[in-house]
Image (spheres, rainbow, N blue to C red):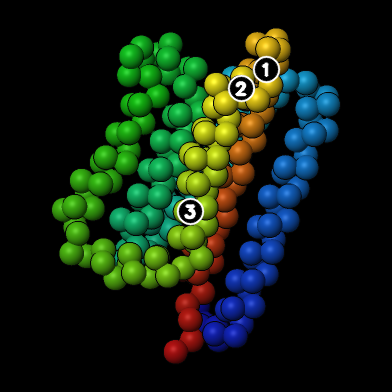
């Protein structure tokens, strides 16, 4: 693969960021017509939105895993990112795991990041350079933004007691629907950011910089 100049690489990077932004806007804007058709069921367990979230996470995990196979110097980092996606898939399918594995449930998915963490500790001397490059890349900051959206925003703003205090004494089914809408919509945005991060890493590793 021929290396590309810094100017061309910068231009390509900005163009991709714009496309990611358009993708996020498109997905969020699509929620209203889908809700108009499917109603509140869109946001419930095993609904269309939750299945799409799993698809997004699975695609990101496969991209991370594919890059891990072909780029040895970044392998541990990429496997770590893939394991986060795997954990997210288990979390989004918690209704199934509640039945299949009572008590443990979706937490069985922690096996993936724990396994990668143990492997990373064993190979810790080999990952420093890869970590430095990753921390300097746009993909790292996209992952940070994704974590912010998925955890503080989705979980805290979608917190049931907060919504109850804001809405007052209204029907509990309405409160549950509002909570699910906020939580699932924010999680979707976070997962798409993770997928964009996987795409960004793929392009950065596929097209080396010209020295």
Whether 72 is drawn above or below 38: the answer is below
Q: Earlier in the sequence, mark 2 or mark 3?
A: 3
Q: Verify CB contact (< 8 Å) between mark 2 and mark 3.
A: no
Q: Which mark is residue 143?
A: 3
Q: Secondary structure at mark 1?
A: loop
Q: Taking the image as drawn, is residue 19 in sight? A: yes
Q: Quadrant of residue 20?
A: bottom right
Give the percent coordinates (x, y) of residue 135.
39, 65
Give the percent coordinates (x, y) of residue 144.
47, 53
Assess disc 2: are there few (<14), some (14-19) or many (≥20) residues with their C-alpha within 10 Å of its C-alpha. few
Q: How far apart are labels 1 and 2 at the CA level?
A: 5 Å
Is 144 on the left-hand or right-hand side of 19? left
Q: Earlier in the sequence, mark 3 or mark 1?
A: 3
Q: How far apart are labels 3 and 1 at the CA level?
A: 36 Å
Q: Which residue is mark 2?
A: 165
Q: Verify CB contact (< 8 Å) between mark 1 and mark 2.
A: yes
Q: Quadrant of residue 166?
A: top right
Q: Which residue is mark 1?
A: 168
Whether 125 is drawn above or below 147: the answer is below
Q: Secondary structure at mark 2?
A: helix
């Amino acid at each position: 693969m021929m290396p590309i100049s810094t100017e061309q690489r910068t231009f390509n990077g900005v163009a991709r960021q714009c496309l990611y932004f358009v993708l996020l806007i498109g997905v969020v804007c699509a929620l209203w017509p889908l809700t108009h058709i499917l109603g509140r069921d869109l946001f419930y367990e095993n609904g269309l939105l939750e299945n799409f979230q799993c698809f997004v996470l699975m695609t990101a995990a496969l991209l991370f895993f594919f890059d891990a196979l072909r780029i040895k110097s970044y392998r541990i980092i990429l496997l770590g990112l893939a394991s986060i996606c795997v954990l997210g898939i288990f979390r989004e399918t918690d209704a199934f795991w509640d039945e299949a594995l009572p008590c443990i449930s979706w937490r069985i998915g922690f096996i993936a990041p724990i396994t990668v963490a143990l492997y990373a500790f064993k190979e810790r001397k080999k990952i420093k350079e890869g970590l430095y490059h990753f921390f300097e890349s746009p993909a790292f900051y996209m992952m940070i933004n994704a974590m912010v959206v998925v955890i503080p925003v989705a979980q805290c703003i979608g917190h049931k007691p907060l919504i109850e205090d804001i809405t007052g004494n209204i029907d509990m089914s309405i409160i549950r629907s509002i909570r699910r809408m906020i939580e699932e919509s924010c999680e979707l945005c976070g997962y798409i950011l993770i997928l964009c991060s996987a795409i960004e890493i793929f392009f950065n590793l596929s097209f080396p910089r010209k020295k």
